[in-house]
Image (cartoon, rainbow, N blue to C red):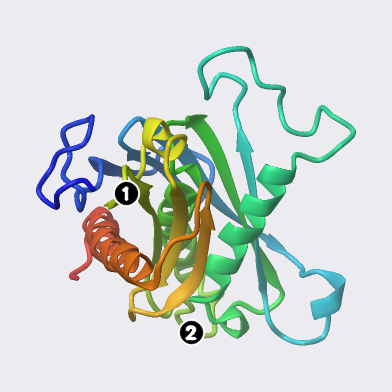
C-alpha cells in the first residue's frame, strides 16, 4: 500500500487536489459564465435564465433548474470524438452527467424564490484529464450565483435563492491507497473510482462509488470520504475567492 506521505506520478500527495482556477465572466452574453480549470481539465459553465417552467410545474409558482453537458470533439487525445447530438442514440454518459449536475444544484436552490423561470446550466468540456463531472458541478455553482445576482439586480427574485455552496471531487483507490482528485491516468488504473458531491453545510448530495477490480472495505470507504471532504473544502474556498465572499 502506498504510504500516506508518498507522492503520486504528478508529484501530489494523496490528499492534495490539482491546482484549481475559477474565472468568472469568461463569455460576454450569459449572465453567469465561468471557466473552471482543475489541473489540465477545463470546463466552460454558463447559466442563463428563460421565462416559463416545464409542464409539471405550471401553476405551482416555483421555478426550475436543469443542466446540459457535452464534451467537445477535441477535448480528449486520439481520434476526434463525435459531437453530442449528431448520433441518433443519445450519449449515455453525457445524459448521466447532466442529470447529476442538475440534481446537485437543485439541492441548494430555493426554487420558489424564482417563480416561473428556468435556469439553464450548460457545461462544455474544452479539455478532459479526469474529473470533468466534478469540475462541472463546482464551476456551475459560481455561474449560477452570477445568474442569480443578475436576477436580483432586475428585482426578479422573491428572496435570495441560493442556500449554501455545492461542490464535488473524485476520490479512489490507486495502488491500494486512497487518493483525492484523480487525473485520467490514475482514474483509468484505479481499483475504486468514486465521485462525491457535498454542500457547504457538510451534507452529502451524492456518492457514486464503483469497485473496478475487487470490493472495498468500510475503512477504505471512510478514508476516501475523509479525503473527499478535505478536497471539497478546498474547492469551497476557491468558489468563495472567485466570488469575493468570506468563507
Label 2 sits on a secondary structure element that is loop
In the picture, the quarter occupied by the C terminus is bottom left
Mark number displayed over residue 176? 1
Is residue 140 in sight in this rendering?
no
Q: Mark 1 Cα within 10 Å, few/some/many (few <14, many 20+)?
A: some
Nearest the viewer among 144 and 210 is: 210
**Height in image: 227 above or below 127?**
below
| Residue that sits furthest to the top in the current view | 79
Counting from the top left corner in percent of width and height, residue 77 is at 51, 17
Helix, strand or loop status at disc 1: loop
Would you say 23 lies left or right of 16 here? right
Tell me if residue 220 can be seen: yes
Residue 219 at x, y percent in the picture: 32, 70
Which corner quadrant of the image does residue 111 belong to?
A: bottom right
Cα distance, mark 2 to mark 1? 48 Å
Percent of width and height locating residue 201: 34, 81
CA neighbours of label 2 inside 10 A, class few (<14), some (14 to 19), many (20+): few
Q: Is residue 50 above or below residue 2?
A: below
Residue drawn at 28 percent across, 66 percent down:
223
First of labels 2, 1 by sequence position: 2
* Residue plotted at (41% across, 55% down): 138
Which residue position holds label 2?
Answer: 159
Name the residue rendered at 22%, 30% in the picture: 10
Instruction: Give the quadrant of residue 54.
Output: bottom right
Instruction: Give the residue at x 44% y 37%.
Output: 130
Given residues 98 and 49, the one toward you in this image is: 98
Amino acid at each position: 500500500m502506498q504510504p500516506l506521505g508518498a507522492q503520486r506520478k504528478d508529484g501530489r500527495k494523496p490528499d492534495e487536489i490539482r491546482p484549481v482556477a475559477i474565472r468568472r465572466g469568461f463569455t460576454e452574453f450569459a449572465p453567469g459564465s465561468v471557466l473552471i480549470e482543475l489541473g489540465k481539465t477545463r470546463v466552460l459553465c454558463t447559466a442563463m435564465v428563460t421565462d416559463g417552467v416545464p409542464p409539471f410545474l405550471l401553476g405551482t409558482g416555483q421555478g426550475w433548474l436543469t443542466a446540459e453537458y457535452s464534451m467537445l470533439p477535441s477535448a480528449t487525445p486520439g481520434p476526434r470524438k463525435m459531437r453530442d447530438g449528431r448520433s441518433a442514440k443519445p450519449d449515455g454518459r453525457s445524459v448521466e452527467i447532466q442529470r447529476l449536475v442538475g440534481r446537485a444544484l437543485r439541492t441548494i436552490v430555493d426554487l420558489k424564490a424564482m417563480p416561473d423561470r428556468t435556469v439553464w446550466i450548460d457545461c462544455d468540456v474544452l479539455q478532459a484529464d479526469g474529473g470533468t463531472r466534478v469540475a462541472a458541478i463546482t464551476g456551475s455553482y459560481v455561474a449560477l450565483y452570477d445568474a442569480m445576482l443578475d436576477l436580483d439586480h432586475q428585482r426578479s427574485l422573491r428572496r435570495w435563492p441560493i442556500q449554501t455552496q455545492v461542490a464535488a471531487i473524485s476520490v479512489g483507490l490507486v495502488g491500494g491507497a486512497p487518493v483525492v482528485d484523480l487525473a485520467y491516468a490514475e482514474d483509468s488504473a484505479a481499483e475504486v473510482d468514486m465521485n462525491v458531491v457535498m454542500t457547504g453545510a457538510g451534507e452529502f448530495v451524492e456518492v457514486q462509488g464503483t469497485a473496478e477490480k475487487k470490493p472495498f472495505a468500510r475503512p477504505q470507504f471512510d478514508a476516501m470520504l475523509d479525503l473527499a471532504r478535505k478536497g471539497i473544502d478546498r474547492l469551497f474556498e476557491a468558489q468563495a475567492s472567485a466570488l469575493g465572499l468570506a468563507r
